[in-house]
Image: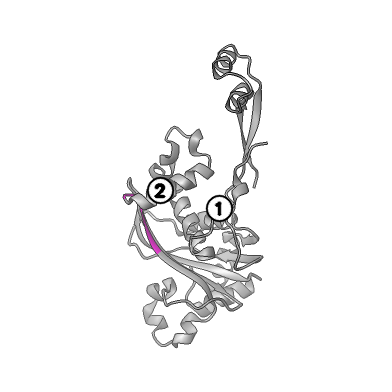
Amino acid sequence: MEAATTRVPTCVCLARRGWIPAGLALCLGLAGGCILQEKTVGPVVVANRDFGAMTIAVAPALNLSGAADFDPDRFADLMASELSYVEGVSVVPVSRVLGVLATQGVDGVESPTHALELARVLNADAILVFAVMEYDPYDPPSIGISAQLYGVRPGPGVGTVDPVALSRQASLASATGSARTRGILAQTQRVFDASHASVVEEIREFARYRDAGGSPYGWRKFVVSQQEYIRFCCHATIRELVDGGKGPVLAEARRER
């Protein structure tokens, strides 16, 4: 992941530090006398204090929203892209997951046992399985996501939210409770409704680290664009899975040099 660079006039920087008067800095800037200084804006890196180094695959999204204008593979690509920002995590490309599913003659994950088997076949430590419960991408957008991280090693105790079970309740009805929860490392379920002030605050913070200042929409870039809003929802979902949404984005994500 490469950092983007922007240029900041050195005269402005010097004025901010009190080395030259602000008025002189303005004059120098208008006269074209500023020397441009590079400012590095790094990618958002999500802290990973609980799971450590892992390889994770991402399954295609399950569409439980009833929306027709929904691309499960594209949604999974964005989820995988955001997952790659987690510290210490390597991501198996979604295309590889789709390839294995194709050889099995299925379109998606069929059960928790199937999820664990996919992780094994892909030589991954875990696989992220998620369902989109609500999908209204128009301003103000609202998207609901239920996600589970199935892994080959034990994790902390969790509840019973299961996007796979929600989509295939009949086929899982005969499974035991232990089979449904076996191998779940983390899970989350949430509706991201951009008409709520708390969600807007999260979007603003996300936009700040994603350098939304280059867009004419500013932070609202992640609201007016369907793809960018999905990206924000994926990022927030992953943070919930990794640390319950409480851990900070690493402080070194934005710095000057």
Q: In which quarter of the image is residue 97?
A: bottom right
- Does residue 7 appear in this view? yes
Residue 238 image offset from top left, x and y in percent? 51, 60
Q: Are marks 2 and 1 in contact (CB under 8 Å)?
A: no
Considering depth in this image, is 239 or 175 the residue closer to the camera? 239
Considering depth in this image, is 190 or 115 the residue closer to the camera? 190
Colour mapping:
one colour
The residue depicted at 36 percent of the width and 65 percent of the height is 64
Residue 105 within the magenta-colored segment of the rendering: no
**Identity, as a three-letter code, of the amino acid under mark 1:** Val
Secondary structure mostly taken by the magenta-highlighted segment of the chain: strand
Q: Residue 249 carries which label?
A: 1
Residue 68 image offset from top left, x and y in percent? 35, 57
Q: Quadrant of residue 42?
A: top right
In the picture, the quarter occupied by the C terminus is top right
Label 2 and label 1: CA atoms lie apart by: 15 Å
Mark 2 Cα-neighbour bin, 10 Å: few <14, some 14–19, many ≥20: few
The residue depicted at 55 percent of the width and 53 percent of the height is 249
**Magenta region: which residues?**
190-195
Residue 127 image offset from top left, x and y in percent? 56, 69
Among the two numbered marks 2 and 1 on one chain, the one whose residue lies closer to the N terminus: 2
Figure check: 15 above or below 210: above
Q: Which mark is residue 179?
A: none
**Identity, as a three-letter code, of the amino acid under mark 2:** Glu
Q: According to the image, label 2 marks what residue?
A: 201
Left or right? Give the position of 39 relative to 170. Answer: right
Left or right? Give the position of 113 relative to 66. Answer: right
Element type at mark 1 = loop
Residue 1 image offset from top left, x and y in percent? 64, 47
Figure check: 78 above or below 152: above
